Image (cartoon, rainbow, N blue to C red):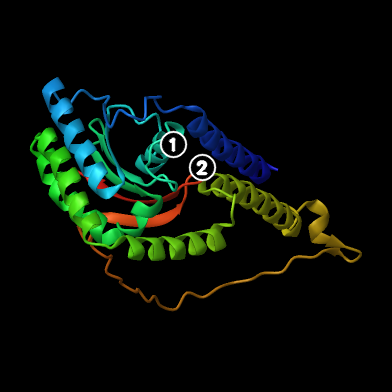
Amino acid sequence: MRKLFIAVISLVVCLSFFSTTAIAAVPTVNPSQKVVDLAGLLTEIEISTLSQLIADASERTRMDFIVLTTDNSLGKSPRIYCEEFFDNNGFGLGPERDGMILYIDIAKRDVYFNAFNRAAAVFGPQEQNAVLDWVAPYLSDGRYYEACLAFVEVSEYYISGVPSGEIDRRYGEIVYRVDHAYGRGLTIPMAAIVAAIVSGAILLILFALHSKSLPQKPGIHTYFDENGLNMTRKEDVFLRTHTTRMALPKDGGGSGGGGSIGRSSGGSISRGSGRKF
């Protein structure tokens, strides 16, 4: 019973975590606002200049560029925060709502690059980490404006290097792969909740079966039969020991990672990479 109780409590905590994360709403802004500096890292002049540069880059690439800074992640991962911010505020250009976000969490020292829809066909893990390779050093030095400029300029460089027809071809392959992997309409957060429920149910069943198979605690009747007291003696002889040593792997110390792809809760194709700075 104790194990069953622990399993139930674990399931409730897990579901509560998902519910709490989903309830905390990201800020609502006008989608025409491309620089959302919630953390106050940029001056008004820097925001104005950066906004104009983004408008020019968007005109050339037909993709949306969003800079988002915060000092409160609302308990969400960088990816979930970016996805909800992008979808809930209606960002993205064109019929597929193409675009990308540079997310900077100054409190947690997180930087994250998230590409959406057709932009995800341009920015795979290698390209995303190349952008972050330019952005992260500026952030580490406290040069936030230069980091945002690097995001826009390097991102446009990669977009301009891929013909539109090739982007469409890659995007079609990504949509097919994602929808067959997750199932159309089953979003990644929903899939996580379903997985948590199924896992919890399986744990409950396993604990119940295991509890039934456990031997009963011995009582006084265990040692008596019709002939009286019935006890046996068992003795184990310990002969020798053998110790196996294994070297633990060291931290590779890589500069970044990610690039996982799927659908956001709002239905957008989403691919992101991030690191600390």
Q: Tell me which numbered mark, 1 or 2, is placed earlier along the sequence.
A: 1
| Residue found 80% across the figure and 58% down from its top | 222
Residue bearing the label numbered 1: 84
User: Whole-Å distance between the Cαs marked 1 and 2?
Assistant: 7 Å
Q: Position of residue 177 (x, y in %)?
A: 49, 64
Determine whether the residue tagged by mark 1 lies in a helix, strand or loop: helix
Q: Is residue 163 above or below residue 274?
A: below
Residue 267, compared with residue 25, is above or below; it is below
Image quarter in which the N terminus is found: top right
Residue 126 sits in which quadrant? bottom left
Q: Nearer the viewer, residue 33 or 76?
A: 33
Image point (26%, 62%), residue name: 162
Q: Secondary structure at mark 2?
A: loop
Q: Residues within 10 Å of mark 2 (few under 14, many from 20)?
A: many
Name the spot of residue 135 as percent of width and height, x first.
15, 45
The residue sitting at 55% across, 73% down in the picture is 236
Left or right, residue 140 beside residue 211: left
- The answer to whether mark 1 and mark 2 are in CB contact below 8 A is yes
Residue 265's disc number: 2
Packing grade of label 1 (10 A; few <14, some 14-19, many >=20) is many
Which amino acid type is shown beneath numbered disc 2? Ser
Tell me: 30 left or right of 60: right
Residue type at the position of mark 1: Glu
